[in-house]
Image: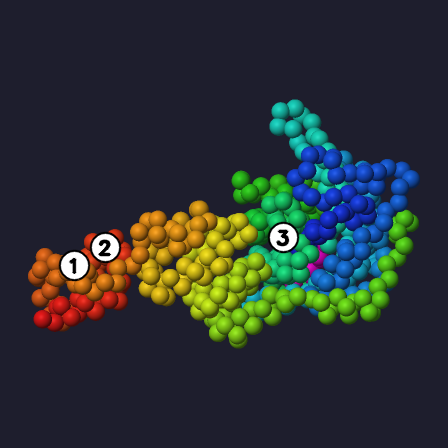
């Protein structure tokens, strides 16, 4: 029997506001436990929340960027459940009247484009965090995160493979970063997702029993977790076993999922309108003001990179996947570097050296990279030496000119100096010289290689090639 995979994602994007959603406490990450708290986010009796206006504006921005309907009238609700990191016994969220309604974004997998529907985007507060003691059988509660503003983005179950799910997640990650509403740091939990996944026989309309995967803090973990769950459910169905609707935790070390609890439905949370917050009414004028001030988004920037910089689609897709990388590229090009050359260096040398780290950690400023590439264009150094210099720049942050001077890496372009070495090499390799004269032109690589070895890679390769041709013709 063949099965079809059905995946829907629930993404939580933590907004990069300075203060929490309903109080003035700081949202700074990494503070000592329970130091960014107040009676409101601690759930003390008798306190009243006050909505952070920036949270509303961020929701409008994301809704407009994802072709969604902005609900001008929306309302907060209480989502009731009991857990140690939820001091009030409920989470202030939105339910039947969210701020953002249906919309969609387009993804591309293996050259095939597909539209993924968005069910809703709503505002809510985050819960606290439990810290489990490694020695004693106790857990500690840190409520710094309690009340941090979130946007929950709920997709339609439109994804049919782990690859599509990851493409959707990456696209949404790029959008929130371009909008400047979320830093997208998955390791710190400011951009995280839960995945609902089920299998059904091909051709069946009715959805299968779904499970929910949690604890995935990287794109790679999402990919691995979904692939594992597809295999697990398929094996169970083929064996005639019943899929249990439950929440699963992904263990990236063991590369398997573990049962956490039975999966809740909406009625389990006993939603009802929050009596402490008035409904939110958004004017059409505010929506249009936000729309006018939206930044250039990933798809628009990709199209511009292809049109204005004449970049291949592959380059444009890679460069615009991260707004910081796209900005870095444009700053390099602004210094007069040819766009394709800048693109090649960023995609190969720079991103490889970063090893997956954010480009903000890069010690090489765009102006420094532009200076390095200009030195290559002017034959001050060779392309091979430039890669060595770049490695030093990534470690030290020094300017390329300083490194070239300190290590005496200037390219040798003195024809007389090079000709003396050329003559020496030809005389030491008469058999190879005869082979070249007899038409075996590929042996030129051998001669130039010998020259580079003797000059420690500093010889001008074009000049070296020309000098060998001239000398071997005699």
Pick whichever of labels 1 and 3 is earlier in the sequence.
Answer: 3
* Local SS, label 1: helix
Q: Report x, y in % for residue 68.
A: 73, 66
Pick whichever of labels 2 and 3 is earlier in the sequence.
Answer: 3
Residue found at x 33% / y 59%: 381
| Disc 2 from disc 3: Cα separation | 47 Å
Q: Is residue 112 above or below residue 75?
A: below
- Where residue 80 sits, quadrant-wise, is top right
> In the shown orientation, is residue 125 left or right of residue 228?
right
Residue 424 or 260: which is nearer the viewer?
A: 424
* Local SS, label 2: loop
* Circles 2 and 3 in contact, beta carbons < 8 Å: no
Q: Look at the image and name its color scheme.
A: rainbow
Q: Nearer the viewer's eye, disc 1 or disc 3? A: 1
Residue found at x 53% / y 65%: 330
Q: Report x, y in % for residue 413.
A: 26, 63
Pick whichever of labels 2 and 1 is earlier in the sequence.
Answer: 1
Q: Is residue 342 above or below residue 398?
A: below
User: In the rendered image, which residue does mark 2 sit on?
Assistant: 455
Q: Is residue 156 magenta?
A: yes
Residue stretch in magenta: 152-158
User: In the rendered image, which residue does mark 1 sit on?
Assistant: 421
* Circles 2 and 1 in contact, beta carbons < 8 Å: yes
| Disc 2 from disc 1: Cα separation | 9 Å
User: In the rendered image, which residue does mark 3 sit on?
Assistant: 184
> In the shown orientation, is residue 470 left or right of residue 294?
left
């Amino acid at each position: 029997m063949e099965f079809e995979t059905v995946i829907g994602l629930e993404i939580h994007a933590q907004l990069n506001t300075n203060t929490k959603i309903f109080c003035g406490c700081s949202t700074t990450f990494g503070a000592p436990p329970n130091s960014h708290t107040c009676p409101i986010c601690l759930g003390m009796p008798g306190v009243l929340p006050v909505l952070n206006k920036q949270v509303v504006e961020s929701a409008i921005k994301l809704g407009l960027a994802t072709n969604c309907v902005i609900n001008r009238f929306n309302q907060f609700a209480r989502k009731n459940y009991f857990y140690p990191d939820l001091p009030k016994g409920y989470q202030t969220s939105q339910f039947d009247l969210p701020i953002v309604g249906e919309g969609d974004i387009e993804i591309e997998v293996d050259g095939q484009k597909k539209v993924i529907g968005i069910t809703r985007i709503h505002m809510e507060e985050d819960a606290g965090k439990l810290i489990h003691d490694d020695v004693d059988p106790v857990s500690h509660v840190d409520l710094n995160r309690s009340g941090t503003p979130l946007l929950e983005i709920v997709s339609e179950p439109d994804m049919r493979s782990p690859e599509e799910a990851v493409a959707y997640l990456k696209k949404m990650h790029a959008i929130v970063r371009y909008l400047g509403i979320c830093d997208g740091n998955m390791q710190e939990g400011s951009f995280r997702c839960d995945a609902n996944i089920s299998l059904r026989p091909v051709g069946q309309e009715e959805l299968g029993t779904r499970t929910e995967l949690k604890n995935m803090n990287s794109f790679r973990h999402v990919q691995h977790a979904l692939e594992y769950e597809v295999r697990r459910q398929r094996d169970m169905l083929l064996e005639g076993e019943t899929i249990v609707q439950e929440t699963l935790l992904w263990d990236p070390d063991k590369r398997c999922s573990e049962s956490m609890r039975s999966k809740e439905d909406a009625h389990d949370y006993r939603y009802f309108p929050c009596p402490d917050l008035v409904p939110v009414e958004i004017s059409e004028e505010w929506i249009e003001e936000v729309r006018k001030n939206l930044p250039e988004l990933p798809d628009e920037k990709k199209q511009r990179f292809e049109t204005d910089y004449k970049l291949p689609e592959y380059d444009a897709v890679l460069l615009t996947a991260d707004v910081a990388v796209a900005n870095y590229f444009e700053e390099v090009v602004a210094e007069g570097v040819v766009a394709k050359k800048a693109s090649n260096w960023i995609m190969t040398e720079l991103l490889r050296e970063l090893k997956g780290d954010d480009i903000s950690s890069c010690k090489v400023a765009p102006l420094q990279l532009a200076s390095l590439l200009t030195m290559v264009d002017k034959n001050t150094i060779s392309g091979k030496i430039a890669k060595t210099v770049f490695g030093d720049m990534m470690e030290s942050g020094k300017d390329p000119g300083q490194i070239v001077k300190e290590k005496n890496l200037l390219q040798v372009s003195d024809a007389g100096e090079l000709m003396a070495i050329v003559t020496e090499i030809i005389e030491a390799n008469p058999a190879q010289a005869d082979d070249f004269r007899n038409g075996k032109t590929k042996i030129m690589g051998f001669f130039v290689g010998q020259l580079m070895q003797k000059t420690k890679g500093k010889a001008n390769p074009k000049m070296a090639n020309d000098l060998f041709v001239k000398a071997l013709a005699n």
